[in-house]
Image (cartoon, rainbow, N blue to C red):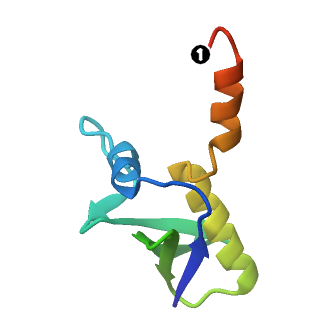
Amino acid sequence: MKWKIKLNFPFDWRLKLKFAILPERPTPCIIKDKKWIRAIELSHKKVPVIVEAGEKAIVFHSTHLKERERREVENIVKKLLGIEDTTKLYEFMESDEVLK
């Protein structure tokens, strides 16, 4: 099963992958051929997930999932990889005298 979520903000997939692993410590994911690979636990079962970057989208590959499970996988991956629109954060930082 394959699906996409569109992104409406700039996103550097290569940079995200560099932050997804720690060279001195083992991590629960594998980075291979510009793909992020990990098992995620949903409803007491492990689900294999592969994530890669497409044209202004994140592409997910996994086993057959219900719609609710797909949304759960998307939310977990977004949190783990920090995939979000940072425009508001940067605007706040620019307006703050200390953070400027």
* Front position in the image: 47 or 22: 22
The residue located at (52%, 54%) in the rendering is 10
Percent coordinates x, y for residue 28 in the rendering: 40, 54
Q: Residue furthest top?
A: 98
Residue at point 56%, 79% (across, down): 4
Tag count: 1
Quadrant in the picture for residue 7? bottom right
Q: Quadrant of residue 3?
A: bottom right
Q: Position of residue 39 (x, y in %)?
A: 47, 67
| Image-based side of 93 in relation to 82, left or right | right
Q: For mark 1, what is the residue? A: 100
Q: Is residue 84 above or below residue 7?
A: above
Q: Nearer the viewer, residue 7 or 3?
A: 7
Residue 17 location (% of width, % of height): 36, 52
- Examine the rendered structure and indicate whether residue 84 appears above or below residue 35: above
* Amino acid type for the residue under numbered disc 1: Lys
54 horizontally vs 86: left or right: left
